[in-house]
Amino acid sequence: MASITVRNLDAPVKDRLRQLAARNGVSMEEQLRMMIRDGVATDPLSGGVEPAGLGRSAQGPAENASGVSMAGSASLAGRRILLIIGGGIAAYKSLDLIRRLRERGAAVRCVMTAAAQEFVTPLSVGALSADHVFTDLFDRQAEHDIGHIRLSREADLIVVAPATADLMAKLANGLANDLASTVLLATDKQVVLAPAMNPRMWSHKATRRNLATLRGDGIVFVGPNAGEMAESGEAGAGRMAEPLEIVAAVETLLDRAPKPLAGRRIIVTSGPTHEPIDPVRYIANRSSGKQGHAIAAALARLGADVRLVSGPVSIADPAGVNTVHVERAEEMRDAVEELLPADAAIFVAAVADWRTSASAQQKIKKQADSGPPSLQMVENPDILAGIGHHRQRPYLVVGFAAETQNLLANAQAKLARKGADFIVANDVSPEGGVMGGDRNRVRIVSKAGVEEWPEMSKDAVAAKLADLVAERLKSVEV
Ligand SMILES: Cc1cc2nc3c(=O)[nH]c(=O)nc-3n(C[C@H](O)[C@H](O)[C@H](O)COP(=O)(O)O)c2cc1C
């Protein structure tokens, strides 16, 4: 069998491969394997179905099956981003963010706060952005033509990453005592904040107040995510969103593509539910929310007014999507019902089938003489079936079937029982790595039959499904 050695590839090909591998966080060999696999899957001779994104460059960002943004090289071509870097440990990630934005064709100009310069140097930021780095409100050279106004005027969008608690507080209160805060107060451009801070700073009442004010002022937030913090031993909500998540938000906000779902309200559920046993324990599942969140983002990119009802996940809320956070299945049902009427509803969440009949008020303690406690379980509401048969049933109802066996038979049974228009069936057996992973292989089960989609990234599944929803809603009056 023939083999390919990466070392022997032509230098430009190798360079491009290196970029793609870095972007996808895989080795060059794995990137090559993914591309060959995708090539075979999309070869018309193989009978494979074309993954979403191929041949739809006019539709804005989309991915091919290897998770590579098809619009990647040019999705932000000609766009000017003003990146304000605040003084937090996550400032090092802003260096990667500059690269990612520029890879997509954006011109990136940077403003650094005094504190930011304690974490990364203007030299690195300038080298990566290939532009002068602005640090001083009273810079005589820049201010002869009122530099802070020009910085805003010459940008299509302003990103603040990391957005410190301090910058949020200043912006929420209209303070303008350095270049970053003055630009933010003087701008009429869309501002995107990627907060990063210690979880206690993030959950502090003052920061919550500032967050609410800024949201009300039309500021878009990306993240923060939950997880380990850079400070050792610290974990919780406060990690800055990853550069690619911020790029996705920027792409969405600047997307010029047609909006076939404009004027449509679509409900999406995502993630697991947590069913409490006592105040500290709960029943959960391995759903990460990646597929549901990607679908919400893809629908928003097509112009839909997306209402995402998310169970507890550690990924960021998708940009441009209105997200409601819930924990339990009953809360998810109530949130979905409150969002009716809608044109479509897509139920991706892995809702727990059962909950304990009553959650204990206090932590259940080990009893030396009585052994483990027995849990009395009761059935949770069936949210998909409830909406599928609701008097305010959306025109289009889509369910997901996550199965480990008899995938098609279970999906077909679910279709009829739940009143859904179609079921997206995916095999979540552990060996497939779908739950928590970045790739998925689904079948669309409807009355018309079964359509198999090849394995592709969850983002590509989302883009293809969003196209399908747009197609189905085309003939329905807004
Ligand atoms: C080591 C260190 C790490 C810090 N990390 C953060 C952080 O992640 N987020 C934050 O909001 N503030 C952080 N701070 C505090 C900010 O640097 C401080 O509030 C500063 O005034 C922010 O200035 P700026 O908003 O003008 O960038 C950190 C401070 C130090 C010394």
Image: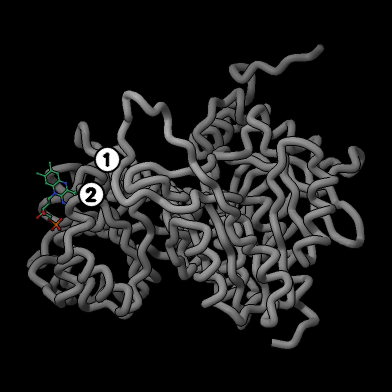
What is the distance, in whole Å, between disc 1 and disc 2 at their CAs?
7 Å
Under 8 Å from ligand 1: the CB of mark 2? no
**Outermost residue toward the front in this view:** 369
Q: Is residue 57 left or right of residue 231?
A: right
Residue under pointer 1:
235
User: In this image, 289 relative to 443: left or right?
Assistant: left
Residue found 69% across the figure and 54% down from its top: 400
**Eyeballing the image, is 325 above or below 185?**
above
**Mark 1: secondary structure:** strand
**Residue located at (21% from left, 33% from top):** 233
User: How far from the left and from the top, in percent, is residue 412?
Assistant: 84, 53
Colouring method of the image:
one colour
Residue 180 seen from this side: no
Res. 415 image quadrant: bottom right
Identify the image quadrant of the N terminus: top right
Circle number at residue 199: 2
Query: Which disc is residue 476 wearing?
Result: none
- Residue shown at 88% from the left, 44% from the top: 44
Q: Badge 2: how crowded within 10 Å, few (<14), some, or many (20+)?
A: some
Q: Is 214 situated above or below 113? A: below
| Viewer-nearest residue: 175 or 112 | 175
Q: Amino acid at mark 1?
A: Ala
State the residue at coordinates (20%, 76%). Answer: 185
Considering depth in this image, is 146 or 85 the residue closer to the camera?
Answer: 85
Q: Secondary structure at mark 2?
A: helix
